[in-house]
Amino acid sequence: MSWDKNRLRALRLALAELYPRETQQRAFAKDAGLVTARIGFEPAADLTWFNVIEEARRAGRIDAVLANALAEYPADETLKQVAANQAPEPLPAPVMARDLPWHGPANARPALEKIMGSRSALVNVSFLERGIQSARAVARIRLPGESGTGFLVKPNLLITNHHVIPDKATALQAAAQFNYQQTLAGMDAEVAEYALAPDEFFATSEKDDWTAVRVKGDPASRWGVLSFVSTKVAADDRVNIIQHAGGGSKQLSFYANVVVFVGEGRVQYLTDTLPGSSGSPVFDRDWRLVAVHHSGGWLVEPGSKDDVYYRNEGILIDVVIAGLKTAGAPE
């Protein structure tokens, strides 16, 4: 059976919908005869299934992957189309800024200055200082074999995603690494690592993909905390994300960072992230915390049936604040 890019993409997206959780993905890959040690299991299902399909291609077992899925979901329309070599048309490629029509009429008059979008992207130079100050409270979360991102709020609570730290047992194996970043000279800064104390406080929500856990000691006295208050964000705003993308040193993403949707407890934006960025704080242009980043790729817009867009997504901070209040978090 021949496999072109369209059929592989359709299979991957179908599998991401049918098997969204890592436990399901690992079991499936093993049943399909794949070596799971060769596969990178990512927080986002779409990314994991990309890795699974790549390993299946290498091992010559794409047909086995399809057969395995059809055995469990014989009525799935997409799988049946893929099996019949009638894969649906590919989703449109995401529109990038470089693809937009910047040219104008031949008689256009030159101007000395111009705001390029519907809103000015200019900020006060203190924007840089505030960003550096906010970055101090952002930590790399070290876990066995993987990593994520989190941030500190009062009183010494680490906020991240549920899929990064889903339970107390995982929290006991994790550590928060502050100052995991490069210096101006390009050298690795001295890292301060703190164990977590889930027995002192732990709360999580699988539905809204957030976790809060107490950090041992008093890291807030050295690294500070982010202001944890209700903050509104709207479409066409700009959001910046401080993150440990790819599990590496702390980075900041603030190019092409437009908000494209807000609703139903979620905010979707064009700001760049990578695996390892899960749990990162999402800030508005005034460095106010507005969301917790948790996923990206081809996402369904909340409230719609099948409107799919190439975006990143965060959990609105109001959702996390409400959840922590219900859980009886210390103040």
Image (cartoon, rainbow, N blue to C red):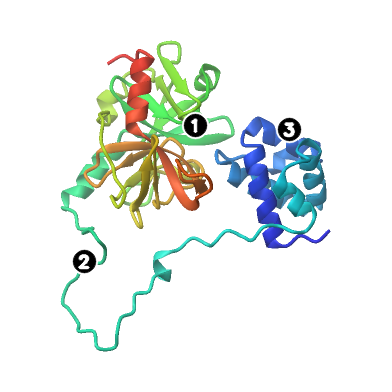
Amino acid, disc 3: Ala
Task: Tell whether label 3 touches label 2 (CB within 8 Å).
Answer: no
Q: Is residue 34 visible?
A: no
At numbered mark 2, what does the secondary structure look like: helix, strand or loop? loop
- Where is mark 3, residue-wise? 27
Amino acid, disc 2: Ile
Residue depicted at x 38% and y 17%? 216
Task: Tell whether label 2 touches label 1 (CB within 8 Å).
Answer: no
- Where is mark 2, residue-wise? 115
Query: Where is residue 131 shown, x and y percent of the image?
Result: 25, 44
Query: Where is residue 11 shown, x and y percent of the image?
Result: 70, 50
Query: Where is residue 69 shown, x and y percent of the image?
Result: 76, 41
Label 3 CA crowd tier, 10 Å (few <14, some 14–19, many 20+):
few
Q: Does 232 appear above or below 59?
A: above
> In terms of depth relative to the viewer, which is nearer, 290 or 150?
290
| Of the image marks 3 and 1, the number of the one nearer the N terminus | 3
Amino acid, disc 1: Arg
- Where is mark 1, residue-wise? 142
Q: Separation of disc 2 and disc 3 at Cα?
A: 52 Å
Q: Separation of disc 3 and disc 1 at Cα?
A: 25 Å
Residue depicted at x 52% and y 24%? 166
Query: Quadrant of residue 7 in the image?
Result: bottom right
Label 1 CA crowd tier, 10 Å (few <14, some 14–19, many 20+):
some
Horizontally, residue 270 falls left or right of residue 134, namely right
The quadrant the C terminus occupies is: top left
| Of the image marks 1 and 2, the number of the one nearer the N terminus | 2
> In terms of depth relative to the viewer, which is nearer, 242 or 118?
118
